[in-house]
Amino acid sequence: MLFDDDPRDVRKKDFIERMRRRKSGELLGPLAEKIAAWEKGETDAADVFKAAGYASRKGESMIADFRKRPDVILAGIAMDENRYITALGDIGIEVRLTDITEVFSDAIITPVDPGGDMTAGPGDLATGNVIHAAVSDGSGGITAGSVTEALAAALKEAEELDAETVAVPGLGFVDGGIGAEESAAAVVKAVENHSGDSVTKVLLVDIAEEVVAAFVDELEKRDEE
């Protein structure tokens, strides 16, 4: 049965449940604030009922969406978040403006400093694996070449883990790193050069608009060639 044995299906279920709770909170939070304001005499009942009606309508739609099959739910989430969709060779590419902890993947790749410490904490993850990418060069600096080399090694590790979907942030766009455009080009180059049997989709994900826009620009250039 679904979710009984397959670890990937179990992670899908956990990821979807976390998304359901987050979206529920986004609806119920404002309503709770309206109720609290009414109790303090700061608003009237009409505002509370209006907020309740909105939460009810949106909530019914959300509940219906989350009753769909897991793959359909994940596809819907991706559709809402995707900024660009293309392919590099046999690897599908999706660019998303979101936190890397908010995507479903088999592995995420996170940059680490020369000492092996993560430059940012990945938080609570539904992913199966976290792969560290040492983006610094031998001198401790970050270059386009060191980013490409680090991601190439990380993608090989993803192959060894049998990861199908891998999430990658703007690896070079960290403190003391390179610009968004150069970072995006280095990341895309590594994905473009990757060959393997396991990785079939790469999610280029970042919370920075600048990085996401750079990913899109770089991919558009290749699609135009």
Image (spheres, rainbow, N blue to C red):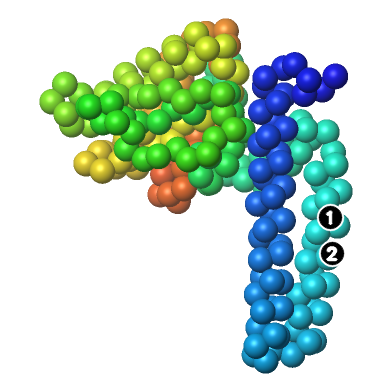
- Residue for badge 2: 57
Residue under the image location 45 percent in, 17 percent down: 155
Q: Is residue 16 above or below residue 115?
A: below
Q: Amino acid at mark 1?
A: Ser
**Label 2 is placed on what type of residue?**
Arg
Q: Which mark is residue 61?
A: 1
Residue 142, picture quadrant: top left
Residue 199 relative to residue 34: left or right:
left
Q: Secondary structure at mark 1?
A: helix
Q: x and y percent of residue 58 in the render?
A: 80, 61
Quadrant in which the N terminus is drawn: top right
Mark 2: secondary structure = helix
Image height check: is 191 above or below 118?
A: above
Residue 152 is situated, as x and y percent measured from the top left of the image, at 39, 17
Between marks 1 and 2, how big is the CA–CA gap? Answer: 7 Å
Asked if the residue under mark 2 is in contact with the one under mark 1, i.e. CB atoms within 8 Å, the reply is yes
